[in-house]
């Protein structure tokens, strides 16, 4: 089993593919597949006697896969529909094809692809971001065995809405920024070559098969966007969980293998205050434009951070991952910290979450007393009132 035992944390860091169980295609839902993976991870933790940290491609993997499948599927449907309409328009007439007619046909195709793709992903992306964010926050409570006191508030909802809206900007803008102009040039060259309507239609269909002249092809872009989106969603959820439990410091945990980027090697093992991580998250959510995120959380090269300590690096905006496209780095809590659910400003008492079979007031009172005794025994939540 590939593994890295980090010097700072002494946690077992499972590399991508180590738990090579592709459970989703077995007919399981995303949640069922995730639950099955988690059960296996708990067994491995018990056998190995240490905590498993799945850096980068760990718990959010089912959500990342779901996002990739959604984007690939809807992109394929939209481009097929748009291309078919364009070819129909080309073959609807005989004779030479004028630049004005071709421009009109391409305009209809552009609008069709953008509209169809937008309708296809709308609403579905929210479900996936919601799942990844909630999994990130739930993982923190699970790690401290405090799932029974987890709560979801207005900030959680706002964060999930922001994640969805922000990434829809980059999803929706891909066609106009990357594809549309290239198609126009490819077809324009065909017309200069004297190609007929049928030949131009074939070139148009071929374009959406090979994407000539485009370095950031859809398969690369969609997989990278999904990976980074799920990484950020999970990190946002984790930050909120750490805040609520009073955890003050995080440790950056990179996947150390032959694919590790230089910036992730530089950040690996650095200690980040939760307050700084939360501050960056809040600044991103308050930004006026998605383009402003490039300044708030820039992707810099190691040479731009040379000679800086962690405080100086954070001053440049490099705080929470992702640190680059296809980034696999994540964060974990610095070891030795004890949760304190009263740390979150404004939280006077816990909102209890009860198992389904705990229903009556008497049962709930006994349940709260039991949990209180257990937390007190572990040194957590001193003096908590049931």
Image (cartoon, rainbow, N blue to C red):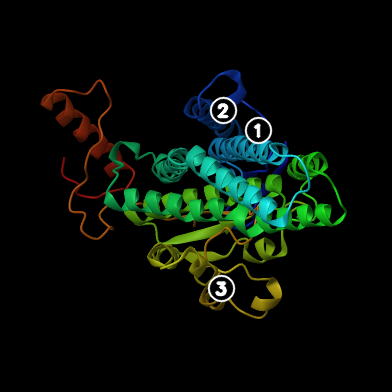
- Vertical comparison of 375 with 341: above or below: above
Quadrant of the snapshot with the C terminus: top left
Residue farthest to the left?
A: 361
Task: Specify whether residue 57 is in view.
Answer: yes
Q: Secondary structure at mark 3?
A: helix
Q: Position of residue 270 (x, y in %)?
A: 57, 65
Q: Where is residue 372, by image quadrant? A: top left
Picture residue at 55% right of the left edge, 78% below the top: 312
Query: Could you give the CA–CA distance between mark 3 and mark 1, rounded to whole angstroms?
Result: 32 Å
Q: Please, which residue is most extreme toward the front here? A: 95
Please state if 162 lies on the left or on the right of 80 as rendered: left
**Residue 251 location (% of width, % of height):** 53, 59
Can you give x and y, in whole percent of width and height, for residue 158 in the image? Answer: 33, 52
Q: Which residue is mark 3?
A: 310
Quarter occupied by the N terminus: top right
The residue tagged 2 is 40
Query: Is residue 13 or residue 109 the one in the foreground?
Result: 109
Label 2 packing within 10 angstroms: few (<14), some (14-19), many (20+) = few
Could you say which disc has been placed on residue 172 in the image? Answer: none
Tell me whether the residue at label 1 lies in contact with that at label 2, contact meaning CB atoms closer than 8 angstroms.
Answer: yes
Q: Is residue 153 left or right of residue 41?
A: left
Residue identified by numbered label 1: 19
Farthest residue toward the right? 193
């Amino acid at each position: 089993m590939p593994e890295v035992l980090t010097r700072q944390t002494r946690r077992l860091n499972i590399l991508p593919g180590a738990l090579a169980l592709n459970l989703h295609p077995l007919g399981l839902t995303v949640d069922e597949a995730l639950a099955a993976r988690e059960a296996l991870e708990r067994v491995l933790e018990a056998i190995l006697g240490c905590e498993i940290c799945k850096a980068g491609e760990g718990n959010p993997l089912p959500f990342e896969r779901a996002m990739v499948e959604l984007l690939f599927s809807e992109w394929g449907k939209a481009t097929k529909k748009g291309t078919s309409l364009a070819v129909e328009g080309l073959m609807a007439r005989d004779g030479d094809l004028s630049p004005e007619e071709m421009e009109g046909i391409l305009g209809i195709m552009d609008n069709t692809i953008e509209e169809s793709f937008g309708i296809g992903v709308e609403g579905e992306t929210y479900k996936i971001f919601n799942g990844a964010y909630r999994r990130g926050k739930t993982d923190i409570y699970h790690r401290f065995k405090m799932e029974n006191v987890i709560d979801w508030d207005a900030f959680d909802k706002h964060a999930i809405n922001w994640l969805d809206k922000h990434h829809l900007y980059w999803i929706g803008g891909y066609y106009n920024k990357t594809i549309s102009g290239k198609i126009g040039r490819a077809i324009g060259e065909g017309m200069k070559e004297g190609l007929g309507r049928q030949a131009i239609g074939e070139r148009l269909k071929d374009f959406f098969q090979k994407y000539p002249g485009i370095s950031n092809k859809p398969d690369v872009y969609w997989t990278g966007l999904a990976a980074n989106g799920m990484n950020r969603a999970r990190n946002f959820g984790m930050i909120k969980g750490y805040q609520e439990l009073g955890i003050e410091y995080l440790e950056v945990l990179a996947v150390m293998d032959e694919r590790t980027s230089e910036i992730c090697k530089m950040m690996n093992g650095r200690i980040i205050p939760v307050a700084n991580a939360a501050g960056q998250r809040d600044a991103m959510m308050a930004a006026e434009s998605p383009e402003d995120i490039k300044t708030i959380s820039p992707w810099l090269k190691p040479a731009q951070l040379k000679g800086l300590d962690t405080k100086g690096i954070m001053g440049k905006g490099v705080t929470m991952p992702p640190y680059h496209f296809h980034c696999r780095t994540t964060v974990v809590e610095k070891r030795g910290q004890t949760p304190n659910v009263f740390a979150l400003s404004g939280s006077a008492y816990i909102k209890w979450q009860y198992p389904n079979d705990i229903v009556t007031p008497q049962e709930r009172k006994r349940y709260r007393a039991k949990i209180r005794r257990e937390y007190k025994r572990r040194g957590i939540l001193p003096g908590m009132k049931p």
